[in-house]
Image: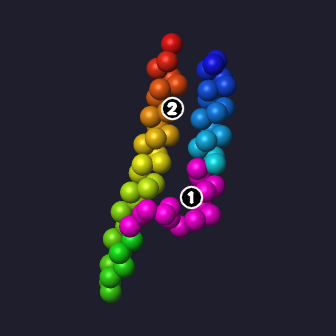
Amino acid sequence: MPIGRTLILLGAVLIATGLILSWTEKLPGDIVIRGKNTVFYFPIATSLLLSALLTLGMWFFNRR
């Protein structure tokens, strides 16, 4: 796949991910613990999703 199409595909994936995250405050699987004066937020699902997207992107760029 030429580099231009790869960049377009990665851009579309990033836009879709951004839209999904902007419509929802958090993904299912993210941990939020609200205390009296504090909030603990641990984005497990978001971290896994971003890791998968970055891994796919690096795989596309390093493929020859």
The image's mark for residue 21 is 1
Q: Quadrant of residue 20?
A: bottom right
Residue placed furthest toward the front? 29
Q: Residue at x 51, y 13 (%)?
A: 64
Label 1 neighbour load within 10 Å: few <14, some 14-19, many 20+: few
Q: Is residue 61 above or below residue 57?
A: above
Quadrant showing the N terminus: top right
35 vs 57, left or right, is left
Q: Answer whether residue 25 is magenta in the image.
A: yes
Q: CA distance from mark 1 to mark 2?
A: 19 Å
The residue where tag 2 is placed is 57
**Where residue 14 appears, x then y in whole percent?**
59, 44
58 vs 12, left or right, is left
Which callout, 1 or 2, points at the residue further toward the start of the chain? 1
Q: Answer whether residue 4 is magenta in the image.
A: no
Label 2 neighbour load within 10 Å: few <14, some 14-19, many 20+: some
Q: Quadrant of residue 23?
A: bottom right
Q: Which stretch appears magenta?
A: 17-31
- Amino acid marked by disc 2: Gly
Front residue (pair 14, 45): 45
